[in-house]
Image (cartoon, rainbow, N blue to C red):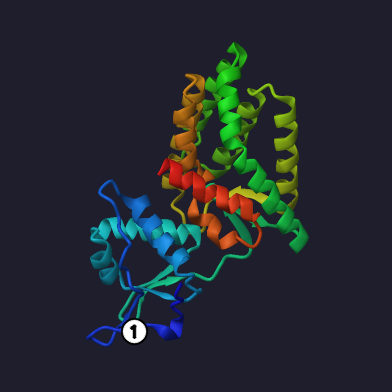
């Protein structure tokens, strides 16, 4: 692997710095914003690019990836939200690998602000890893074990989700409620106990989830509500595969975990990559 540092970029004919060699990086025909973002994130990871490394100007990236200006701008916004890149305008501007946000964990398209010691942070990472890794088991078990009472409760919570768009506090409150309800709907005492323990560990070391820095609140809550509504509705109709596929967008396989690799178990990082491959 090669590493492109701040002082190791080449220049184009106009004297502007160029980013790394993009040969082999392909954005397939189905790609939209998320797939462009994933291609850029994959390049950062595969080349082990250090913070501050130059990816290219917007013009260079549009040409390399063969995408429209609007698609690239939205993809870069996704990566900025994940804490993976910074975008600087102007003549000397461009896109660079961001310094990691060490004050928070980044999972499930949310920022989990760290509040305790280094030990608390590591334990929080372990707790969140267990919590997210078990989500596929939770929704599958709930889909098969759902009672009439569970059905009514989840239907009511689905309506609460719709009402939380535009209000992050309301969204994260009902977000916790929907995951608690899905867990209860498994009727599996061991699973419930395990997840509750992992959640308590995560809560002890973080301030809970909040929107990524710089996120448009209305757009963010609308997107997150849509994901959770789809998961709930898939469970209600017993469609495990649909629920699992939507979990990909929930955050089970998000690349925004890359910045937190020091705090998350390696096995969890491997699981995330596997999930992305099999659902991508």
What residue lies at 55% left-to-right and 22% top-to-bottom? 143
Residue 228 position in % (x across, y down):
49, 34
Residue 51 position in % (x across, y down):
50, 74
Give 31 or 178, whichever is nearer the viewer.
Answer: 31
Up-down: is 13 above or below 207? Answer: below
Residue 180 position in % (x across, y down):
65, 31
Can residue 134 be seen here? The reply is yes
Pointer 1 residue: 10
Q: Residue furthest top?
A: 148
How many numbered discs sit on the rendered protein? 1
Up-down: is 18 above or below 132? Answer: below
Give 40 or 106, whichever is nearer the viewer.
Answer: 40
Relative placement, left or right, of 75 versus 172 is left
Residue 149 position in % (x across, y down):
61, 14
Local SS, label 1: strand
What residue lies at 65% left-to-right and 41% top-to-bottom? 131
Q: Residue furthest front?
A: 1
The C terminus: image quadrant? top left
When asked about the image quadrant of residue 279, the answer is top left
What residue lies at 56% left-to-right and 38% top-to-bottom? 170
Say few, some or many: other residues with alpha carbon within 10 Å of mark 1 (under 14 / 14 to 19 / 20 or more).
Answer: few
Relative placement, left or right, of 138 versus 71 is right
Can residue 109 be seen here? The reply is no
């Amino acid at each position: 692997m090669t590493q492109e540092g701040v002082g190791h970029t080449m220049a184009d004919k106009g004297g502007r710095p160029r980013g790394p060699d993009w040969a082999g990086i392909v954005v397939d025909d189905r790609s939209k914003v998320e797939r462009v973002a994933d291609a850029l994130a994959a390049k950062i990871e595969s080349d082990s690019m250090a913070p501050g490394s130059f990816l290219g100007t917007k013009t260079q990236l549009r040409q390399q990836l063969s995408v429209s200006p609007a698609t690239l701008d939205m993809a870069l916004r996704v990566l900025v939200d994940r804490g993976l890149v910074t975008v600087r305008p102007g003549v000397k501007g461009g896109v660079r690998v961001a310094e990691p946000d060490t004050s928070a964990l980044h999972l499930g398209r949310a920022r989990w602000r760290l509040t305790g010691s280094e030990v608390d942070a590591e334990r929080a990472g372990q707790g969140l890893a267990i919590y997210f890794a078990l989500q596929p088991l939770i929704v599958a078990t709930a889909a098969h074990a759902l009672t009439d009472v569970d059905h009514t409760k989840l239907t009511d919570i689905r309506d609460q989700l719709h009402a939380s768009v535009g209000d992050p506090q309301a969204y994260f409150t009902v977000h916790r409620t929907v995951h608690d309800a899905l867990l209860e709907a498994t009727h599996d005492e061991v699973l419930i106990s395990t997840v509750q323990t992992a959640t308590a560990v995560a809560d002890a070391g973080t301030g809970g989830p909040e929107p990524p820095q710089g996120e448009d609140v209305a757009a963010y809550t609308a997107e997150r509500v849509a994901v959770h509504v789809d998961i709930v509705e898939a469970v209600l109709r017993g469609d495990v595969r649909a629920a699992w596929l939507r979990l990909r967008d929930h955050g089970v396989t998000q690349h925004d975990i890359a910045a937190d690799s020091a705090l998350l178990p390696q096995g969890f990082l491997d699981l995330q990559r596997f999930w992305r491959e099999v659902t991508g």
